[in-house]
Image (cartoon, helix red, strand yellow):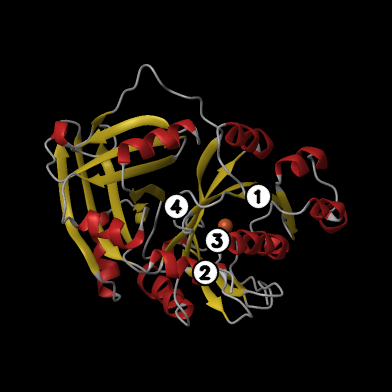
Amino acid sequence: METSTLPKNTNTSEDFMPINGTDYVELYVGNSKQAAHYYKSAFGFQSYAQAGLETGLKDRESYVVVQDKIRLVLTSPLKSGTEIGKHIDKHGDGVKVVALWVDDATIAYNNAMERGAKSYMEPQVEEDKDGQVVRAGIYTYGETVHIFVERKDYNGTFLPGFKKWETPDYNPEPTGLKFVDHMVGNVGWNKMNHWVKFYEDVLGFKNILSFDDKDISTEYTALMSKVMSNGNGRIKFPINEPAEGQKKSQVEEYLDFYEDEGVQHIAVATDNIIQTVRDLRSRGVEFLRVPATYYDAVTDRVGKIDEDIAPLKELGILVDRDDEGYLLQIFTKPVEPRPTMFFEIIQRKGAQSFGKGNFKALFEAIEREQELRGTLH
Ligand code: FE2
């Protein structure tokens, strides 16, 4: 059952947790230097900032890459036995931090703590010659954390402690990725409502859409999902949990391989998905494919759209429509050896939903990949 309960603009004067947007996403990875190269080469991110031995850090090295409003931080340990190393050992490469840009990190943190959050990092002021940033953090599902970032007094590169990362000889062109549209978490059996309540109680989010196992199922596998949104709609966190099916669903596979709850996908927006996906493919990004027959019925299902069907079919881009318009979307294969985190590329043309009409074709495509991995049983 799909339900829509939230009016377009919630009155933000009642929003106890105003959030301006996604500040950055930090991944703990085995080799941050090579990961940065991958995100530059394959996805068109730009070199931006760096922190490590040269900036006085002894235990880790971070590279920050940027594309329009999207900032990815790629962090690896410089020695054994670190929290970062343990995170990578357990989960493989994955998202550690979903950072939220706020006006006052201390108030955000205190509000969250009063409402039952578990502390990750008490408010701390970080300072350099370019000003100061205040950050504070709380845990969410698994070992994933939200860090509140207050940067109104900061004019430097990324955060205090980082220096500009310049690569004059290698700067591949951007691919048109603009901002984080939504980020999805996979949580354990019967845990979806627990985390829905967490986002409602602790961060003041609202449940704007719900999908049950009848919406999201194939002959073999199923999952359930609820979409949480903050007051101004800039932050959307769908939360998935597995549902009983004949075979192991993609969410169960994720939980097995990530060995925990965690971020399943990062959806990034573009204004021209055909151009972006053509570009990403030519740079080696691998996408899930639906059968060509998907396109036989697409016009009947979604009606007239601005794009020609031929390039959508050629590139494997999916289309869905809701009351407000339509959207175009496509999903990458996992971007690390474990079948865990992947990216979605999305172009919204009015639609504010998440591609419900594509779920079945998409999950059948994922099942074919699971079959190849021997995890569909
Ligand atoms: Fe998505």
Contact? badges 1 and 3 (CB < 8 Å): no
Q: Which mark is residue 156?
A: none
Contact? badges 2 and 1 (CB < 8 Å): no
Q: Nearer the viewer, mark 2 or mark 4?
A: 4
177 on left or right of 338: right
- Which residue is under mark 4? 337
Instruction: Determine the secondary structure under disc 3.
Output: helix
Residue 283 vertical placement versus 353 (above, below): above
Structural distance between the alpha carbons of marks 4 and 1: 23 Å
Instruction: Determine the secondary structure under disc 1.
Output: strand
Counting from the top left corner in percent of width and height, residue 321 is at 75, 57
Instruction: Classify residue 263 by image quadrant.
Output: bottom left
- Which residue is under mark 3? 373
Upstream in the sequence, badge 3 or badge 2?
2
Q: Nearer the viewer, mark 3 or mark 4?
A: 3
Q: Which mark is residue 329?
A: 1
Q: Is mark 1 within 8 Å of ligand 1?
A: yes
Q: Amino acid at mark 2?
A: Val
204 on left or right of 7: left
310 on left or right of 344: right
- Which residue is under mark 2? 251
* Along the viewing direction, whichever of 365 and 116 lies nearer the viewer: 365
Counting from the top left corner in percent of width and height, residue 182 is at 51, 55
